[in-house]
Every structure is written in C-alpha cells, then in structure tokens.
Amino acid sequence: MKKLLTLLTACAFVFALTPVKAQEPETEVCVLEYNEDGTIKNEEEYLKCLEEHSQVVPYGSKENDPKK
Amino acid sequence: MNDLDRQLYVGTILKTIRKNKGITLSDLSKKCNLSIQYISDIENGNKSSKSETLDMIFRSMNILFNFDVEVEKQVTHLFNRMVHAHICLNIKERTELIEKLTSHPDWEFSYAYPIIQLAKYMATIINFRDYTYDYQNNLCEQMFYIFSNSQKSFYLLLKGIYLYVDLKHYKKAKEELFRSISYSPDGIIAGFTYNQLGILERYDCNYYLAMIYQNKAKEILLKNNCFIRNLSVEISIGILLGEQKYYKEMKEQFLRTYESACILNDKETQLNALYNIAFFAMYCKEYEDAIDYANKLIKMNCYLKDCYYILAWVYVEKDDRINAGKYYRSLEKANKHDDYIIDCYEKCLKARINNKDKTYYKTLVDLYKKLNKKGYSFDKVMVLEYIIEYCDHHELFEEGYGYQKELLKILQKNH
C-alpha cells in the first residue's frame, strides 16, 4: 500500500513538472508520395486521408504589407 | 492645453501608472499620507494639485515625473512627423523617429506619457520593438479618452490592422477601422484606413464597396502628396479588377502602377504589379500573358515558387505536359518542405500531370472545404470555378449543380 502511494505521488510529481507541449504549427496531414519516375505512389491512401482531414492555403494575388 | 485639460491629463496618467504598477488607492494614500478621496479626485481630473504634491505622489511610486511642458510639445511634434512618415512610407524617417520616441530616458514619465505609450504600441504592431502587445494595448485603452482625435484615429487604425493581419478577426477589424475614420474623416490617416477597409471588403467579394473605399483612399492620399502609399492603393484596385475578371482594365491598371513605381523607385510594388498580371492572366485564361510575365519575374529571380506554379498550371491547361512537368519539377526544387505547408494547388497540378482526375477533383473539393472554414471569398470562388469546370467535363451534373449553387450563394450575397 505504501509502495503504491509512493508510486502515485511520484507520478503526480512528474506529471506536474512536465511542461505542457506548445501547440504544433499546422503541418501536412495527407502526403502525396511519388515513385522515382514521378508518378503518384499512394493515391488510394491519399484520397482516404483527404476524406478525414482538410488541407491548406492556395496561391493568390500579392498586396503590399499593411504593417510596412 | 488649458488648466482643466491639463488636470484631467495628468490625473489619467497618474491613474494609469498606478493601476499598471498594481498599486491600490489605499496603498498609495498610506504611502503619501493623503486621503483616498483626494487622490481619487486628482486621478479623475476633479481636483487641481500643485506640482510638489504630484511629484511626491509619483515619487512614492518610484517615478521621477518630468513636469516640463515643453517635453510634451516636442514629443507631439515628433509623433506627428512619425505618423506622417509612416503613412507616406518614409521608412528611414519613421525608424529614426520611433527609435527616438521610445528610448529617450527623460520623456516617458512626463506629460507626453500617453503619446510615448502610443509610439510603443505602434513599435509593437510593426514588429520594430518587442513590447508585449496586450500590455501596450491596455495602456492605450486606458488613456484613449485623453488622446487627440488624430491620435485616436491612428491607434484604431493600428488596432484594426493587428486584428485582421495577426488575429484574422475581420469583423472586429472593420469596426475599429470605421471608428478610426470617424475621429479623423479627411485626415491623412483616413487615406490609409480606407485602403485597409477596401481590402477587407474585397476579402468578402464586396467589390462595389471595396472600389468606393479604394477610390476614397486614393483621393485623400494624393491630396496629401502620399504618392508611395498610394501605390498600395493602386495595387489593391488592380486586384479588385483582376478578381472580377476585367482582364484588360486589370492589366492596364498594373502597368500604370508599375510605371509609377519605377518613377518612385519602389521595387516591391514593381514586382507585385508584374506578378499580379501573371497571376490574373492565369486566372482569366490569358495564357500567353501569364507565361510572358511569369518568365519576366523568373529572369529577375523574384517570386520563383509562385511563378513556377503559374507556369506549370498554365501548361497543364494548354495540355503541354512536357513544359508542365518541367516547371512542376522546378517548383518542387524551390520548395522547402520542412518549413512550409505544401499547397493543395501543387497537388492538383501533380495529379493533372499524372492524369489522375479523381485525385485532382478530390483535392480541389478538400481545399474548398478548408476555405469554407477560414478562407476569403475570392479563393472560394476560384476553387469552385475549377470544380464546376471539372464536373462539366466529367458530366458530374448533380455534384456540379450543387457547387454551382454554392458559387451563386457567394456571388449573390455580395452583388
């Protein structure tokens, strides 16, 4: 019982000291892989992944920086 | 400034400093041996007080207050010059002035305290100095009512820009920009503010309103001889024309802007103008111009990634797989996958080069879903147009009809 209590206290202590991990920047979720000849390798997995996740920012026009 | 104004001014400064040092009225009254009511009256501008008494109160908070009224005049003059330099994009002068305003040891704790805090707020917004945004913003909010109208207008302009550029809070940003204009409707600051409002309206595809704001911005900036800042407005007008597919007008607009930028020696605007012609030529399917202008930029070694993308896309559209593949490979080489997110459009390109229609289509749909959550209207319009075109070619009538309805919804909302 005493050992269990010590273990729980140690776990709580370690947990309290562990820094909260900063939020990761948005990264690529669905990766399109290619064969050496440039053809697509993983089309099926990629399409399946797209069903579950969303992707990002398109190209666009360029405007001068409003903070400049 | 008359005596009553000065009374309110110094009271507000005292209150702001006390609160931000975390000192309560009760603590301060004990330290100075003055009643809480007396100090509260000074803070609210209801009681005048001799400089000796004020000095004693400030000293009890470890502050040596500079009572020289000339400091405030000098700082106000420099601040106004700095605002002018900022709006007119005179970066060198602005940098010198902001440096001076934020680092002079005898100026901060004086009657110029509110202006110095506003200068520090600006230094934070333009990433010139690393002050804490919330802290500086809080100080400005507390002293807002003793700012002059042009200072209020300038503060709200900066806040609006921060809200939409850093926080993506477009609605709140618009509100602050409108408030900014209400304090100084025809001043030089309003010229820049109208430009920002026009950009925000364009994000929602409110082209008519956006054009009105950009023209108003142009009128004010030219009246005040802010020619370089006006180039940003000219770029915004060109983008407005491009997004509405007024191809000829868009091209003329950017060519005029390019010439003006050459005369004014503004390199960034020159490049933006050329790039935007290439981009909108691609969008409007004027492929020869798109190729021509993208190549011009590549020769100048500018915007390589964006230009390779335009060229690859255009050659795919022209069914020239050899060139499309060539520019796609250049695009891959130009990308550093470890420090940026791969664009959906690049995946679309790759899919088309490989004749993977389904992947192309699904990636577009995925991009549209993502944009629906946080994108600009124009981006949605552009993606929807590609999706509808695909549905047309592949006789996906039901799906195509659904997307056409979505497109109509966006366009009808704003026109």
Image (cartoon, coloured by chain):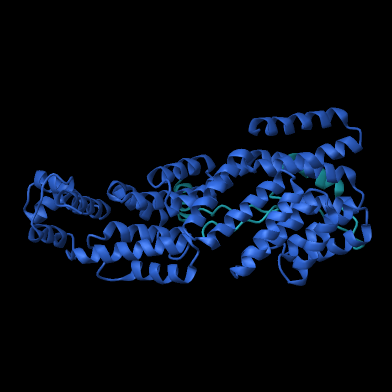
Chain colours: A cyan, B blue
Q: Residue at horizontal 66%, vertical 40%?
A: B377
- Residue B201 sits in quarter: top right
Q: Residue at horizontal 49%, vertical 52%?
A: B220
Left or right: A30 in relation to A5: right
Left or right: B275 in relation to A68: right
Residue A15 in view in this figure: no
Q: How many marks?
A: 0
Q: In this orientation, which residue lies closer to the viewer: B311 or A43? A: B311
Residue B29 in view in this figure: yes
* Residue B238: image location, x then y, percent: 67, 52
Image quadrant occupied by the C terminus of chain B: top right
Image quadrant occupied by the N terminus of chain B: bottom left
Left or right: B203 in relation to B400: left
Question: Relative to residue B135, is residue B179 depicted above or below?
Answer: above
Question: Relative to residue B136, is residue B336 depicted above or below?
Answer: below
* Residue A8: image location, x then y, percent: 47, 48
Left or right: B42 in relation to B254: left
* Residue B284: image location, x then y, percent: 79, 48
Q: In this orientation, which residue lies closer to the viewer: B83 or B39? A: B83
Q: Residue at horizontal 46%, vertical 42%?
A: B178
* Residue B111: image location, x then y, percent: 22, 60
In the picture as drawn, the residue positioned furthest to the front comes out as B223
Q: In this orientation, which residue lies closer to the viewer: B18 or B219? A: B219
- Residue B135 sits in quarter: bottom left
